[in-house]
Amino acid sequence: MAKFIFVTGGVTSSLGKGLTSASIGLLLEAHGFKVAHQKLDPYINVDPGTMSPYQHGEVYVTDDGAETDLDLGHYERFTHASLTKHSNYTTGKIYSGVIAKERRGDYLGKTVQVIPHITDEIKAGIRRAADGADVLICEIGGTVGDIEGLPFLEAIRQFALEAGRENTAFVHLTLLPFLRASGELKTKPSQHSVQKLREIGVQPDVLVCRTEHPISEEIRQKLSLFCNVPLKAVIEECDVAFSIYEVPQMLTEQGLDRLLLDRLGLRSEGARLDDYHTLLDVIRNPRGQVEVALVGKYIALTDAYKSVYESITHGGFASQVKVRVRRVQAEDVRPENVGELLSGVHGIVVPGGFGSRGIEGKIEAIRWARETGTPFFGLCLGMQCATIEVARHLAGLDAAHSTEFDPDTPHPVIDLMADQKGLEKGGTMRLGAFRCALRAGTRSRAAYGDETIHERHRHRYEFNNAYRERLEAAGLVIGGTNPERDLVEIVELRDHPWFVGVQFHPEFKSRPTAPHPLFRDFIAAALRHQESGVGSSS
């Protein structure tokens, strides 16, 4: 039987439950256990697929095509866990399942209620996510005290009763605010948070305290007494100096992994963290620094492109350099200022997105990268913008565009697939992992070192094969295609140091200890560009 760790949060949202959960997963894997991860989100949307990135950050896509919470990206980057549609349940998804059963008559005329029917559905989802794992780490989104989160907290209370307390552990993450006026950390919000949790029937086994300042022994004792947790189970989680990848080290130094193993009755001879410590050495002692620009629509919120930023960083790890990202608002980019906005960068990334805002700025940035020989990497919409740029300025198709932004364009080099027309917006895109055959002699083939790959998608519009010959004649190289439908997956540019656009989202498969091949090679190309002196600022 699997063991279960439930991670809850109090006082305020965005404390870092996802990173803490992922760090626990990394440490348990280092002890030799197979880990699974899950996020339970209390919001009513069925999934985050139709939500603005400013509302909820990026939408993370799994191999099986589920549109999920961005915390699942942390889980996959920190561990070897393979996440699926069962790794993320929302209130909307849970209620949809229960209502569908009620309509089919599955409840045999019973009155359908939050308890037991909603909570039973939540518990069933938890069991599905744990299939085949030694330990499931289940994060409950939101904050204790939120009305929408009550069914999930009640469900995990019931789950612990049914599975046995010897098979379950509760980790509660809370905030210790620092009052500058008095110069002290305050414990009362944490006490109230745990009190609310205990009213529901959940007693934390471990209290993880987010804090800007070290916790004194006096405060530890106070938290232990009033929150009813052992003194050794009060864990300090300060802001890290260099990188989020330092969090697991902070937690293991305080014995969090050992606490959880003891709580769950799991035996280990010790954690094997050699690869992890090698990574930390690279992070703390880079051999240099390179700067790339990210030209996007949602740059005001880091979480909107969370996996992209992390993958760029991973590419730097491969070259043992720190990557500085210059965030450029696509709407601000115009022909007259593009050189000023991008001056001195050694590479340019144009990420995915939806909607027409900032499209012309992205295309202008791509043109600048092409004309100056600056390494360019386009992701999903970034690949489509690169296709439009080449069509307009190299193939002589002046009004070329995507029908997503200009339905009346005379040259729809990017167009909607016939089977996408008339569909609802939620969950109907080309989603999940698809096969891509790589063309010999291309940069992409060299990066992957393989003939066939599988990458994750999230889009509706595709490269229009009606323009394929003309664009190839203009210098565009088709680097990869989906064999089943002959869809263009990768474009490159002939006679350019490094210019690659991909229809998929490689950022979802990059790991700090295994950087994605394309991000690895992109940063290496940016480093060469820097060393050549071409991209240096005056």
Image (tube, rainbow, N blue to C red):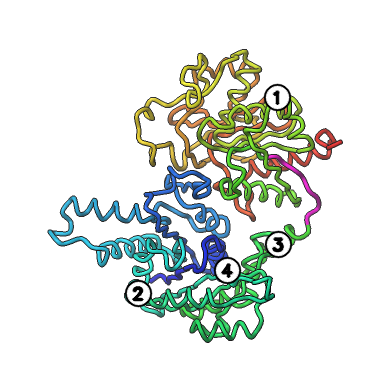
The residue identified by callout 3 is 280
The residue identified by callout 2 is 163
The magenta region covers 286-293
Query: Please, what is the dominant secondary structure of the magenta stretch?
Result: strand
The residue identified by callout 4 is 27
Instruction: Give residue 335's mark.
Output: 1
Label 2 – label 3 distance at C-alpha:
37 Å
Q: Position of residue 513 (x, y in %)?
A: 64, 55
Q: Residues within 10 Å of mark 1 (few under 14, many from 20)?
A: few
Question: Which one is in front in this view, the residue at disc 1 or the one at disc 3?
Answer: 1
Outermost residue toward the front in this view: 181
Outermost residue toward the right in this view: 538
Q: Which residue occupies 50% across, 42% down?
A: 456
Question: Which one is in front in this view, the residue at disc 1 or the one at disc 2?
Answer: 1
Question: Which one is in front in this view, the residue at disc 1 or the one at disc 4?
Answer: 1
Label 1 – label 2 distance at C-alpha:
63 Å
Q: Is residue 289 magenta?
A: yes
Label 4 – label 3 distance at C-alpha:
14 Å
